[in-house]
Amino acid sequence: MTLEELKKKALALPMKPGVYLMQDERSQVIYVGKAKALKNRVSQYFSNLVSHSEKTRAMVGQVDHFDVIIADSEFEALVLENSLIKRHKPRYNILLKDDKGYPCIRLDLREPYPRFSLVNRPAQDGARYFGPYGSRGSTWDLVDALRAALKLPSCGRRFPRDIGKQRPCLNFRMGKCAGWCRPEAGQEQYRQAIDQAVRLLEGEFSQVRRELTEEMEQAAEQLRFERAAQLRDRCRAIELLGQRQKVLSGSLADTDVAGFYRGTAKSCFVVLHFLDGQLAGKDWELLESPVEEDGEVVSSLVRQYFAPRPRLPRQLLLPCALEDREPLARMLSEQAGRRVEVLIPQRGAKLELVALANTNAKEEAERATSRQERAGKLLEQLGRLLALGGPPRRIEAFDISNTGGAVIVASMTVFVDGRPRKKDYRHFKLKDMAEPDDYASMAQVVTRRFTRLKAGEEGWNETPDLLLIDGGSVHARVARQALEALDLDIPTFGLVKDDRHRTRALAAPDGREIGVRDNPALFALLGTIQEETHRFAITFNRAQHGKSVRGSALDAIPGVGPRRRAALLKEFKSIRAIGQASQEQLSQAVDRRTAQAVYEHFHPDASKEDGPCA
């Protein structure tokens, strides 16, 4: 179906809640969405494409037809959408990588020396399982904290097989392990430490700490000071284990806080877990930048994240407004068997917690994305936006700068992989220009630059993937015509400024404007290119203007040519200093006759007052 046919079909849909399935020409489901009113929601995809994000335009471009399923309520639509996303796993929907399950800590207490391990799912094998937790990284952090607190082994030795076979490892020397590989370290003490670990995993921090404190005090009374010191250190470690995260609010209880960050190359979804007012854990998932608006993304991610969870929070804080907040709260409440409150904080401590979750999401996304990867993704987006057929690796930008016709210059800046390559920057002095004419100037500059390219001159022989011209569509058209005259075909667009001289859009030679404000990273890149090109042009203009002023002031003096002018400027540095110098001082730079001529030029009354020279 054509775009108009898709739009016509969408406008014929009812104003009822339901689910829509976008399909490509092979009838493959590429996107599933829900709507309060199908007609309004679906028709938006096929109207005003310029206002869509780059990824949404790409998705719409692949839609051949779509189907809809009408639901009785928004809640039913939400449940159905969740089910269809799981079934079809559409390419353009955000999907959490939940196929690996959520990690659990496994401990087989039937072994003589039980050791911790991580598994994706509990098994019916008689072992104890704790969790599920969030990411594997955060779960290992918990295991490491337990080992440090109770001085349990983290090496590869197996007990009792390896007891006494080798001397203790470095962890024992550093006080990080109790040295269970030594014959004098008994199994009974090991099992006691494991028992404490189990109770800590069950949340009995205060009880374990109280027992250790009592044992420590008893050891001190018996003058067993070394043992008392060991128990004191263990109490401190357990204190840190229980409160290793900062206490952010004493009023929160059993609360999860979701955060979301949409990055250039990667996006990130974060959930912070609060128990008894303490930040107890963090889960996060890195994602490709989504098609949906942030509210739709967060709704989908929350549903996918909590669906397999055996335990749900009593309160969930979200980072943005959701149209389906009430159906989402109902879905979570039905799953939990009790009320789950879903809030979008507007002020106070809860809003600060959401800000913290968003900050965590941003940091995780940016940490996982290298500068090169961000630039690559951004250039891919620019290439698709302009239909270039690939990312513009080398971009050349041009700007004209004139000062009332006295000095007309141009600049060419070069960006490779999104970063400036200053060694390739070039300046141009416009030739045969009687008065300012930006269009003629741009035609001349582009012609001169690419004539050198065709001639294969060193330093000019790299072909750009994209030309950006400071100005609107007419500037781009003039540059395009100059290229065509040289039989060159290079994509060319103008940089259109707003009232505050910031790049607001790209202008094609045919007059089309392509907005970039909906992509902050792309908007920033184009703004940087525009500003750098303008700066390079205006700096050169001022330098040339200063030279012309200096030259005209000295060139009017009889006997002062290029050599003597250079000598004077070398000695005195400026025209003003030359004008203030005495004849004797001027004679230090040039001969006496020239010095007298220069002095009289700047002091015309001096010759009349002094009379002819003797």
Image (spheres, rainbow, N blue to C red):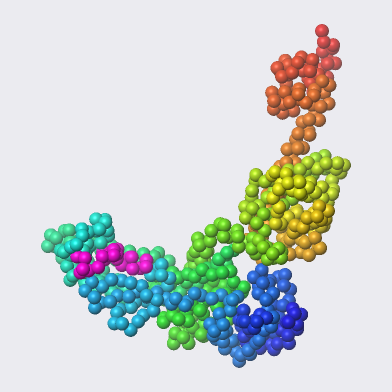
Q: How many marks can you see?
A: 0
The residue lying toward the viewer, choosing from 553 and 188, is 188
User: Eyeballing the image, is 10 above or below 414?
Assistant: below
Q: Quadrant of the N terminus?
A: bottom right
Q: Is residue 37 magenta?
A: no
Q: Is 358 placed left or right of 102 in the picture?
A: right
Q: Is residue 147 magenta?
A: yes
Give the image quarter of residue 388: bottom right
Q: Residue at position x 70%, y 87% from top? A: 13
Q: Which residues are magenta?
A: 140-163
Q: Is 104 placed left or right of 46 in the picture?
A: left
Whether residue 545 is visible to the viewer of this picture, yes or no, is yes
Give the image quarter of residue 380: bottom right
The residue lying toward the viewer, choosing from 257 and 588, is 588
Q: Position of residue 33 (x, y in %)?
A: 61, 81
Q: Is 204 placed left or right of 405 in the picture?
A: left
Q: Residue at position x 81%, y 19% from top? A: 597
Q: Quadrant of the C terminus?
A: top right
Q: Position of residue 474 (x, y in %)?
A: 82, 57
Q: Residue at position x 66%, y 61% from top? A: 391
User: Eyeballing the image, is 83 above or below 270?
Assistant: below
User: Eyeballing the image, is 561 above or below 129?
Assistant: above
Q: Is 338 placed left or right of 62 in the picture?
A: left
The residue lying toward the viewer, choosing from 122 and 447, is 447
